[in-house]
Image: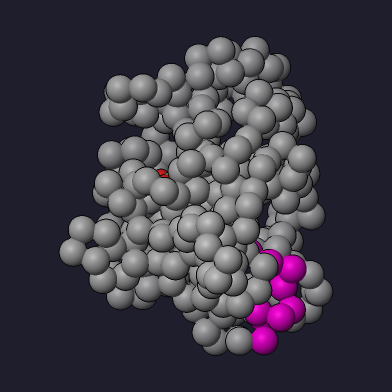
Amino acid sequence: MIVDCDPGHDDAVALIVAARHAELLGVTTVAGNAPITATTRNARIILDMIGSTVPLHQGAERPLVAPPRHAEYVHGESGLDGAELLEPSGPADSTNAVEFIIETCRKTEGVWLVPTGPLTNIALALRAAPDLAKRIAGISLMGGGTFGNRSAAAEFNIWADPEAAAMVFDYGGPLKMCGLDVTHRLQATPERIAKVRALPGHMAAVLADLFDFFSKVYVSRHDNMRGGAVHDPCAVMVLTHPELFTARPHHVTVETSGALTTGMTLIDMRGLIERLAPNCDVTWEVDADAAFSVIVDSIAAFSR
Ligand code: BDR
Ligand code: CA
């Protein structure tokens, strides 16, 4: 897989799970939670932390149409606030993420693209290379849901670049979506964070600090959450550990021009016999304890 991300606390965890449980061909970055220089820097820091030398390529610095807007209110100004992180070992290998995605998917059959940020790079790759739609195994994304977080209707990744998201939901190949309906079921509760903190090694302590920061933000902003929603690893684990998730096929479209609903994923849940063919496997349920154990084990594998 290629993970296309905007680290981001939960993106960082997604990278660690991907490095542990998938054949990670490379990492690409996109502006989202923080500006592109910060998300790329953060991706390099995480790859350094796990000793990964996979290619890292920087991508889009802004959405296709929407203005660049970030999520410092969740992830802090750096995109990865809350822990003492080492300086990155170097910059990205290039600023051509889209080219890297295209070349890798042409060279290797059956790649999964796993976007965990706004869908700008993926949309640009599909537009520049329409053949990818048939070459890749599919796209497994974190985004959307029947409710929003950035607005009442829209989840952040889709809201940040709705035009790109609309292109991706329309691309015609296998598509898996882990939206807020499932990711809010996987919360980094104090008990779960304690399991990370109990692991040996410096990296586990850093991850526990990151979880603490992220969870404090969520708990302070919601009246019914016991920890941060661990969104992005779901898009990885739905591929590496499908038995932990329940999904159903639906037709999903993205609202790009609503007065109140821009960035909403409209999931057709009507039980009509005559309905639009599904274009997306929507994930609804997760075995949260088992999924968090996968996360803890993945961190343990790299922490020393
Ligand atoms: C998504 O937005 C970001 O804050 C997270 O990294 C996740 O990808 C959740 O809405
Ligand atoms: Ca993200």
Q: Residue at x 71, y 81 (%)?
A: 134
Instruction: Give percent across and percent down for residue 200.
Output: 70, 17
Q: Is residue 151 above or below residue 49?
A: below
Q: Residue at x 33, y 53 (%)?
A: 154
Describe residue 228's horizontal placement relative to residue 304 as left or right. left
Instruction: Give percent across and percent down for residue 296.
Output: 68, 26
**Depth check, front residue: 300 or 266:** 266
Residue 285 lies in quadrant: top right
Q: Is residue 256 shown to the viewer in this render? A: yes
**Which region of the structure is painted magenta?**
131-139
Residue 137 part of the magenta segment:
yes
Total of numbered circles in the picture?
Answer: 0
Instruction: Give percent across and percent down for residue 274.
Output: 55, 71
Residue 59 part of the magenta segment:
no
Q: Is residue 46 shown to the viewer in this render? A: no
Instruction: Give percent across and percent down for residue 199.
Output: 68, 17
Residue 75 lies in quadrant: top left
- Spot the residue most to the left: 259
Q: Residue at x 67, y 86 (%)?
A: 131
The quarter of the image holding the C terminus is top right
**Depth check, front residue: 99 or 277:** 277
Describe residue 67's horizontal placement relative to residue 56 as left or right. left
The quarter of the image holding the N terminus is bottom right
Q: Is residue 301 above or below residue 198?
A: below
- The colour scheme of the drawn protein is one colour
**Depth check, front residue: 30 or 269:** 269
